[in-house]
Amino acid sequence: MVTKWRNRTHVVLYALLLVIGLSGPLTLVDQGSRYLHRDYFHTQEFRMQLEQFAATLNLFELNSISKQEAKSAITVEKAEVADYRNQLAPLTEQLNVIRDEYELSIQDALASGNSMAAEYYKAEKERKTADLLKLYQDDDRIAALVRENKENRIDSYYRIRETYRSEFNRFHDQFDYYLWNSASGIVHSSLSANNEQAARNAMSAGSHVYVTDYTIDITNSLHYLIGAHELLDASILPYQGWIAVPKNSPQQALAKQYRWEQFSLFAYVLAGSILLIVCSARLKRVMSFRMETGLWTGFYTRLPIDVRSIIFMGTAVMTAGILVNSAGFYPSLFHSPLLYAGKLLASFAAAAVGLALTFCQGRILANEMRSWSKVKDEWARSLLKRTSSRAEAGVTQIRSQVKDSFLYKSAGVRLFLFAFLIAGFGFAGGWAVAAYFYYGDAFYFLLALIMAVTGVAAFMLSIRQLGYLNRVAFAADELASGRVPDAVPQSGSGVLASLADNINALRQGVRIMQNEQAKNERLKTELITNVSHDLRTPLTSIITYAGLLKSGDATMEERAAYAEIIDQKSKRLKTMIDDLFEVSTMASGNAKLLLEQTDLVQLMQQALAEYKDGMDGSDIQFRLSLPTEPVYVSADGQKLWRVFDNLIGNMLKYSLAHTRAYISMRLTGHQEVAIIFKNVSKHEINDNADELLERFKRGDTSRHTEGSGLGLAIAKSIIDLHGGSLTLETDGDLFKATVMLKVVFYS
């Protein structure tokens, strides 16, 4: 007994020493990022405090102007007045709202004979109408509203800014600084020095423990995190200089504390490493202690091998978790030593017990796994093996019989009901057999045989039918969930066979629908990408040249050139936005057509006349084939001209040089006119011509040309609104667009 307890004590004591030894390197790994620095002033913690101080200093001192100065600097441009007015609803719509608001009240008052109320409502209606008209006509009133909005935003800016005041006050006495703006010459300093050299000497004279160069980055300052900052951007200046920590700063106390914690950590790690080496040298001797058989070891060895393995791994993981968690106590030991010292000792004790249990379990498992035959024996009686074997046997026995019958509960219930009937047949057959032996009449034997054969045949038939029914129902359920099931095999005729045929047809339809959906998702993604690309390109140019104009370094000629480029890109951006708005309006069905009798031949000639100079100067040969007599349709001539203009323009822009392009117009036998445009593209065309009708789609996939990609989409929308059709066909690089419209009459 004395030997048993002595061995246990040795193992636990060894585990405790090993835990203490392991905690040293683990603490270094856990806290290394905090303490592996030359001193406190090179830590991330100090850097964050320095950046917080610089940010609040920039906010409240370096780039701080009063609220009154900010408001007095507000200006309202004509463009802002126009933008404010454009954000309002259309004037006619607002007038209609005012009319609808009072018209019913006026009519009710007149109907009831209350003329005073009617006059009151009329006066209110006229007053609101006059105020609304004044708002649309008086620029000064809108300018006042814009100014008021800007002043409110400035008030909000200064309210939010004050929330950082306490942080600024907390850091103000912890740092000294000397910062200046090289452009304006403005200097801000907490020192009495009157120049840069004097400030540098003051900071380096021994009164400061840390000095660093610093540049205030205004693009990432707190100023830009607060709303309405753009109203103050003109007054925000960058600063550079030095920030230092004086000897009497609370930061110096933190630096001393950091140095002490750093020294203590390295000493602790060194001691733990030495203890870990000593423990490693004695590991073999400890593991050679004799394992005495006791109550818990007898119970443990009777457990299945997989259960013991789980307990062993759980103990090991728990011990490792306690050790890793205790490594995080180190910084808190210096702030709450009594509390965290107790926690650390408790963690060491728990980890030592866990490690000792892990050692003991490892010894037992190693002894039982010494031979392959022993391993196989232990696996054969494991819980997982026994459970899986029993489950596999049971599943294999019934899977083939009920696999299809129990896909749905209702079918399973029907099966059980039918089994109950079969049991009835069996009971009746048993009674017939018993009657045969009792009475000796051959009739009862024949009856029992007939019931047995009938019952078995009916049961097998029901299994087959229910299985087939469930396969069909399962396929339908898959379709309802949006998934494509396997094809249902045809079996016989009747309702189930017809249902299976319909399910297969639906399956094919779902597959087609999913392909279309995938195509639509792809086109949607391409639409977003193309919109972003085409709108960003001119906008980037505008921003770039606007920045060059603001720089003040450009000559008058360069400024004029920059202004011309900005004007061109702005007009291009406006055209693209107008095109996008137009195609969206048409797609939503809100576009209005001004239908009138239109001569397509004359309209085409007008469109061709617009491009005469371009066609004459092009190396593309145009071949025209137009009727000699007018061809009239009911159409909006302006919008239809837009279609012809786009298609002819595309032929000039995208046709291969030194080729022929064909434009023809002819009547068909269905009282329709076909206008056909054919040319050879200089860019490779996707075989799927219909995708060219998508918004922001171009034949030039590299998108180096000036087109918006909306022309064909707008053209198709216009033709659709006229009840016609625009179809595209491609054959290699041959591009063909066909416009079909209903003819009113032909003369």
Image: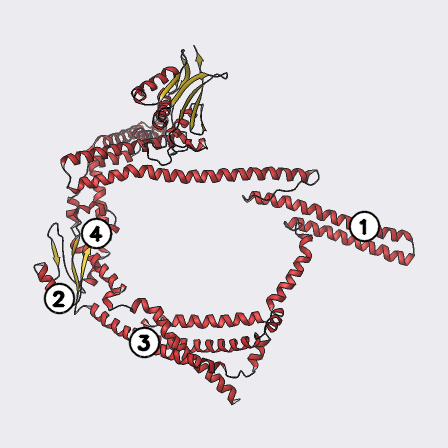
Q: Tell me the quarter of the picture where residue 477 sits.
A: top right
Which element carries disc 1, helix, strand or loop? Answer: helix
> Outermost residue, bottom direction?
2
- Camera-near label (1 vs 2) is 2
Label 3, on which residue?
A: 337
The x and y percentages for residue 443 are 90, 51
Residue 76 position within the rendered picture, expressed as x and y whole percent measured from the top left? 19, 38
The tag on residue 453 is 1
Q: Residue at x 26, y 65 (%)?
A: 43
Question: What residue is disc 4 on?
Answer: 218
Q: Is 460 situated left or right of 693 in this image? A: right
Q: Earlier in the sequence, mark 1 or mark 4?
A: 4
Check the image and report above or below for 375 versus 44: below
- Residue 324 is situated, as x and y percent measured from the top left of the image, at 40, 70
Choose the circle earlier in sequence order: 1 or 2.
Answer: 2
Amino acid, disc 1: Val
Seen at 31% across and 66% down, the residue is 33
Is residue 192 something one can see in this rendering?
Answer: no
**Amino acid type, callout 3:** Pro
Judging by the rendered image, the residue that carries numbered circle 2 is 204
Please tell me whether mark 1 or mark 3 is closer to you in this view: 1
Question: How far apart in space, not on screen, are marks 1 and 3 (Cα)?
Answer: 88 Å
Q: Circle 3 — which element?
A: helix
